[in-house]
Amino acid sequence: MSRDSMEPDHEHTPEEASDHEADLHEARELESEQFDVDHTADVDGDDVLHDRDGARLSDDTDLAEWDGPTEDDEFHRMSAWLNRRAGRFLQTAEELRQTLAGEASARAAIESLGNRIPVDETQSRDLTAAAFFDVDNTLVHGASIVLFARGLASRKYFSYGDIANFAWQQAKFRVTGKENAEDVAQGKDKALSFIAGRETSELVELGEEIYDEFIADKIWPGTAALAQRHLDAGQQVWLVTATPVELAQTIAKRLGLTGALGTVAESVDGKFTGRLVGDILHGPGKAHAVRSIAVREGLDLKRCTAYSDSHNDVPMLSLVGTAVAINPDTDLKEIARVRGWEAYDFRTARKAAKYGVRSAVVLGVAGGTAAAASRLLRRK
């Protein structure tokens, strides 16, 4: 690639340049906090060198006695070189947060596999194919975090006024497809203030109880049947959701699925710190989490299937070989039509209204939908 091809397409106005620089500065601060990366090059891009004990070299250091660059020097020198040449392709703070969220979600998912339901050795296994299901309004009727909040309110952790606020924020997001920064900040702060200092085991226990009381009866049988078909084909089945990973893993466990990718809250010594790892898992973060789990599990994404109700999940849907819209919003229904994706609507009294090809062809399996749903839902 030529140097010219990497130049910006247009000259930034002073205001645009200032905003861009502020965003990159925020990204670097976040990267330093998460990865302990030291962005300490001077304004001219000169690299800071250290001796073998980690002390920085000063201007009066006797280079004749210097024993060469440390590994950290080489790392920072390469990082500085890449940063200077990447220019406008540097990750923004939002992109970095979603990358961190995706990586944290995949890492938590892999760690949870120690509790995976034992595989039936008599069943043939398809090791390179998997299915990824969004949760809210795809698998669960409604927003799982709102249902979880209802359970917390019934235990006096939250007020029902808080639930109304959660529901309103969810409704606005689903209608507009865009997050209001103030809404997100308020919702995130409320949730993080609730868990800060609590034992991680407490959230898991609450998730188990609240699933039984508020979520189990909200599972869409049609979506459960699709998940069961993948299981019957010997494939892994993962949930991918913005819901806290502890609740997502509870849902996955109760339904006999492989595991769950969800939002990860930071914890130290078994207690929540009140901070997220990266950010809430959504949009590009979901795609990154799926890609990461595919690498770790040896999956072929071209042989994988993803399901969602929302156009916000198009990055994840576009990542796999087969995308399926479930109870699609208006934008996703149109995208599915244009791209030839299969679509189901379980919100009607009719059987799944199909806008695309037969699911038996997509999955490479056959079987009664009602029977498949029954097998999965019996695990609740």
Image: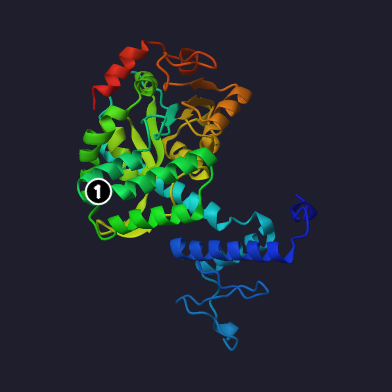
State the image coordinates of residue 40 (x, y, percent, origin top left).
Answer: 56, 73
Residue found at the far bottom of this picture: 60
Disc 1: which residue = 203
State the image coordinates of residue 69 (x, y, percent, origin top left).
Answer: 55, 72
- In the rendered image, the vertical position of residue 13 relative to residue 69, given as above or below: above
- In the rendered image, the vertical position of residue 141 relative to residue 353, given as above or below: below
Residue found at the far right of this picture: 4
Left or right: where does residue 35 sit relative to residue 41?
Answer: left
Left or right: where does residue 206 sit relative to residue 59?
Answer: left
Q: Is residue 280 visible?
A: yes
The amino acid on which the numbered mark 1 sits, given as a three-letter code, is: Leu
Around disc 1, counting alpha carbons within 10 Å, would you say few (fewer than 14), some (14 to 19), or many (20 or more)? some
Look at the image and tell me in which quarter the C terminus lies: top left
Left or right: where does residue 222 sit relative to residue 19?
Answer: left
Q: Is residue 276 visible?
A: no
> Which SS class for mark 1?
helix
Q: Nearer the viewer, residue 47 or 253?
A: 253
- In the rendered image, the vertical position of residue 296 relative to residue 301, given as above or below: below
Q: Nearer the viewer, residue 105 or 172?
A: 172
State the image coordinates of residue 64 (x, y, percent, origin top left).
Answer: 59, 83
| Residue for point 55% across, 26% down | 333
| Residue for point 34% across, 53% down | 191
